[in-house]
Image: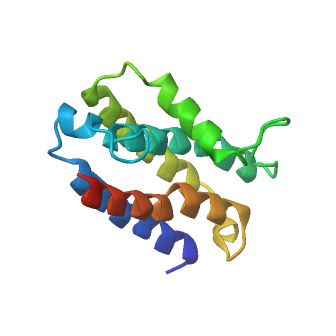
Amino acid sequence: MGEKQKLLREADEKYGELRQAVDGLDEAQMSRVWLGTWGVREIVIHISGWHEAMIPAFGRIGRGDSPYPDGVSYDDSDAWNARFVEAKQGAKLPEILADLEASYRGFVSAAAALGEEHFAEGATARGLFEGAGPQHYQEHIAQILTGC
């Protein structure tokens, strides 16, 4: 099995764990603030935001371009996280969870479309995939399980 398949499988496993941590939480539990100014709701929204940001990045990588459009940088992740959350401020729980599912499917599909070489150790796509995918889920699974 190649590196790409291993990473895609790991993403599926960790995403399943993330969904288990979130499934069954009601609106009040999702909205309770316990992580600075965030609760589970904001965690889920920002994960979706990163998925959505990485989909076109993977497309650009596949074309041999830089992952980011000219003039765009994701270096200030806190600012992007805030932007993602602010954009969904009035969204209801079913919409937030549907966005998470749709963004995950798009994220994995866009990554899967890339060649195996993009998932070699140190490759840009691999770093982006791990950072917005399995590693990101693992970080937040632990927070959700201890914070709720």
Picture coordinates of residue 67 (x, y %)? 74, 48
Q: Residue at x 62, y 38 (%)?
A: 80
114 sits left or right of 26 in the view = right
Picture coordinates of residue 70 (x, y %)? 85, 36
Picture coordinates of residue 4 (x, y %)? 55, 70
Q: Camera-side residue: 109 or 10?
A: 10
Q: Residue at x 33, y 46 (%)?
A: 34
Image color mode: rainbow
- Please determine whether, in this image, residue 137 is positioned above or below residue 36: below
Q: Is residue 127 visible?
A: yes
127 sits left or right of 139 in the view = right
Quadrant in the rendering for residue 31: top left
Name the residue at the bottom extreme. 1
How many marks overall?
A: 0
132 sits left or right of 128 in the view = left
Name the residue at the top extreme. 90
Q: Residue at x 40, y 38 (%)?
A: 42
Q: Is residue 16 visible?
A: no
Q: Residue at x 65, y 49 (%)?
A: 58
Quadrant in the rendering for residue 10: bottom left
Quadrant in the rendering for residue 123: bottom right
Picture coordinates of residue 87 (x, y %)? 50, 23
Name the residue at the right extreme. 70
- Please determine whether, in this image, residue 86 is positioned above or below residue 138: above
- Please determine whether, in this image, residue 69 is positioned above or below residue 18: above
